[in-house]
Image (cartoon, helix red, strand yellow):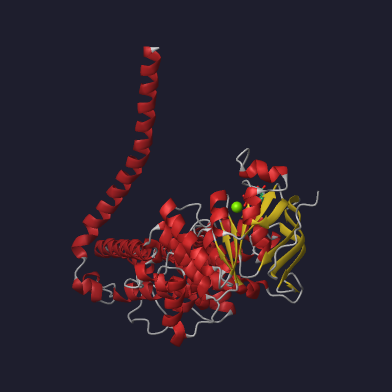
Amino acid sequence: MPTTREREPARPAKFSARGVMAFFGDKRVLHGIDLDIPAGEVTAIIGPSGCGKSTFIRCLNRMHELIPGARFEGTIELDGSSIYGREIDPVLLRRRAGMVFQKPNPFPTMSIRDNVLAGLRLTGSLDKTRAEEVVEFALKSSALWDEVKDRLKQPGIGLSGGQQQRLCIARALAVEPEVLLMDEPCSSLDPVATARIEDLIHELKSRYTIAIVTHNMQQAARVSGRTAFFLQGELVEVGATDRIFTAPTDSRTEDYITGKFG
Amino acid sequence: MLTSTRRRLLRERLFVGLCASAVVIPLLVLALLVGHVALAGLGRIDWAFLSGYPSRRAATAGILPAMVGSLYMIAITAALALPVGVGAAIFLEEYGARSRLAAIIEVNIANLAGVPSIIYGMLGLGVFVRLMGFGRTLIAGAATMALLVLPVVIVSSREALRTVPYAMREACFGLGATKWQAIRQVVLPMAAPGILTGTILAVARAIGETAPLVVIGALAYVTFLPTSPTSQFTALPMQILNWVSRPQEAFVVNAAAGIVVLLITMLVLNLAAILLRNRLQKRVY
Ligand SMILES: Nc1ncnc2c1ncn2[C@@H]1O[C@H](COP(=O)(O)OP(=O)(O)O)[C@@H](O)[C@H]1O
Ligand SMILES: [Mg+2]
């Protein structure tokens, strides 16, 4: 039964992955993934631990290949052009597709303000006259502005875990990416902080294409329009989130979302 | 049962006692030595001694040129060793970690750290004094000392770089930074306290090194202050050596005083390293 392809999505694909295989040394951990990440929508990637969710989204911004011994095969297109072409500079690609990691990782030597500006400073593309504007925009976009606007000079590491993660989101947004790749952004946060990040994702989805990895199915159901279910390096099923959670076509998807394993 | 427990307890106490004496005995010997020297030399130290120039008469001889020479020398040593050492550490740790060349270099750095300092003196004499034509100048001495401390600077800088979590580099890459941008703006600032402490401690050791200076032929009797890196110079260990080798008792007292000055200088440098580290660590929240 062909389950991985559907007539949806209606929106054009931002990322379009075909036959993606990823390796760590000789070990293949993704076995040919075909998946579109539609523009202007939240796509959730769910699946049990170790099934290759992180590896997949790290292929989307070419972070995977930075790990010694890691290798990629297949094609991925961003807005219709290959990101693995010879002429593509992965560094520039990563500015178009920002990443938020599992554990909040603000730079410990930097203030809140400097953390927000870090991406622009690192890449030497900060226009000093616009710095304040960028800081305010990014912190407002990440719903952190009101909490930190009076202490921008204080260390970013002094914030709570949830605030730190929103600071990391602000830091990613300051570079003006088109896509946000989030790898279990709430897994180290408490429920209240998690709820704030989920609200934030709702606000951001009109402006950015978002792919979020989560092992929390309720979270996928709450934040995403589309859900892709991975299992042991394969894409089992993808479709509208409502349908995946109410009428999955693959029995393995059903077993997973009903908690039979995972 | 009970007796075996008691015996085990006894054996444990014995072991702890042995370990403790391994700490205490060397410290005691050290304290004895320092105390002996201090007793002999402390009384000789006054402002005239610290600000005076060497003299044929022990009572009026001072240590100023040697002290200035030593401080000047290690300042240049640090200025030379720090950039080269950090550069080498970055290359090995961040770029060449897996290459064959890096592995070979790594083994050799470990070996170099164990080479007797007199060998470095020979090297300095051959390369800096003769080949490069520096003569018996401050810069030749400092360059030799820089070679001597370089392995330690490299090793401690690598350790400092290694303490920066990979997540920090990943965060940079995720923002579109190149490897070098990540290293320069995030990794190095985070590693700075460790790098600086390691460097100061290494350089502080160089201030007491005598053999390389003897070999490259630093002067022992200097009645002027060094004015530039190309000045001839003397250093504390040379001055002390000169004094101990005199037959008159008064000069031996001068030597003891010189040793006290040398020890205090080292102590101050080590203290500076600790303070600097604590300060910078507070900045790295
Ligand atoms: N750095 C690595 N080296 C070797 N194997 C890895 C590495 N990272 C992940 N893997 C393996 O790749 C597979 C997929 O991992 P990952 O993408 O992290 O899974 P997920 O994010 O779904 O939990 C797992 O089997 C994991 O053990
Ligand atoms: Mg993961």
Left or right: B94 as drawn, with respect to A157? right
Which residue is most to the right? Answer: A1
* Viewport quadrant of the C terminus of chain A: top right
The residue lying furthest to the bottom in this view is A129
Name the residue nearer the viewer: A16 or A102.
A16
Q: Position of residue B19 (x, y in %)?
A: 38, 36
A174 or B164: which is nearer to us? A174
Q: Position of residue B66 (x, y in %)?
A: 34, 73
Residue B154 horizontal/vertical position (percent): 53, 63
Which residue is at the front of the view, A189 or A261?
A261
Question: Tag count in the figure?
Answer: 0
| Foreground of the two, B104 or A99 | A99
User: Is residue A71 visible from the viewing direction of this image?
Assistant: yes
Residue B95 placement, left or right of B283 = right
Residue B6 lies left or right of residue A231; in this view the side is: left
Establish if B76 lies above or below A194. Answer: below
> Image point 28% across, 53% down: which residue?
B34
Q: Is residue B87 visible?
A: no
Residue displayed at 29% across by 75% down: B64
* Vertical order, B35 against B168 (above or below): above
Percent position of residue A207, x then y: 56, 73
Q: Quadrant of residue A16?
A: bottom right
Residue occupying image coordinates x 41% and y 54%: A192
